[in-house]
Amino acid sequence: KVYNRDLANGINRFRWYEYALSSSLMIVLIAQLFGVYDIGALILIFILNASMNLFGLLMEELNQFKKKTDWKPFVFGSLAGIGPWIVILLYAFGNANPAEVPWFVYAIVGSYFVFFNLFPINMILQYLKVGKWKNYLYGEKTYIVLSLVAKTVLAWLVFSGVMQPM
């Protein structure tokens, strides 16, 4: 009942809470693949990523009844979302011997980075009401597909990497 009412108003609270948990966990695991083991750094990566998603929720809450879009939550969320990637890239390319990092780790980061950036593109298209994105539900379905595909690709890359001979 709440879910359907929210969708009719151009908001999906459940999506943002789920993303705040699942994508934060995924990016923490990716950071660990590159050698980020400091518990403080991992907690901050989780919090920054969760904050990015909660800014997505704020974007929907602030703009659900407005004619003119307030982009501040999008901008602040984007800034929060850049933080974990800076740390991951510093570890990925600052590694004393990048050859020691298995191929599948780079494949995971590359594919997750691509999918990670498709989510804000979907939001931009949704708020600019470009083409099919004029209908909020089209953007919602796109989020569902992106989430499923991103998590599936990540799972298969991890599985194939784990199955590599030593």
Image: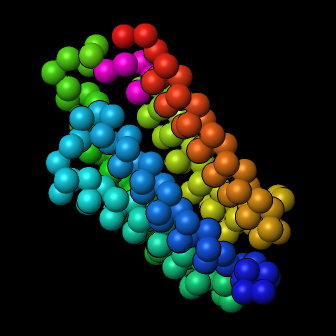
Q: Nearer the viewer, residue 34 or 158?
A: 158
Q: Position of residue 132 (x, y in %)?
A: 84, 59
Q: Quadrant of the N terminus?
A: bottom right
Residue 165: x, y in percent? 43, 10
Q: Residue at x 31, y 21 (%)?
A: 101
Figure check: 2 above or below 27: below
Q: Is residue 33 magenta?
A: no
Tell me residue 61's x, y (percent). 58, 84
Total marks in image:
0
For the rendered model, the colour scheme is rainbow
Residue 145 can be seen, yes or no: yes
Which stretch appears magenta?
A: 101-105
Residue drawn at (24%, 35%) of the image: 35
Relative horizontal placement of residue 147, taking residue 86 as reference (left or right) = right
Residue placed most toward the observer, 85 or 43: 43
- Residue 104 or 48: which is nearer the viewer? 104
Magenta stretch, main secondary structure class: helix
Above-or-below relation of 157 to 90 = above
**Quarter of the rendering containing residue 98:** top left
> Which residue is rendered at x = 62% and y = 68% of the image?
15
Location of residue 70 (image quadrant): bottom right
Q: Does 113 appear above or below 48?
A: above
Instruction: Residue 161 in the image: state x and y as whole percent.
Output: 47, 22
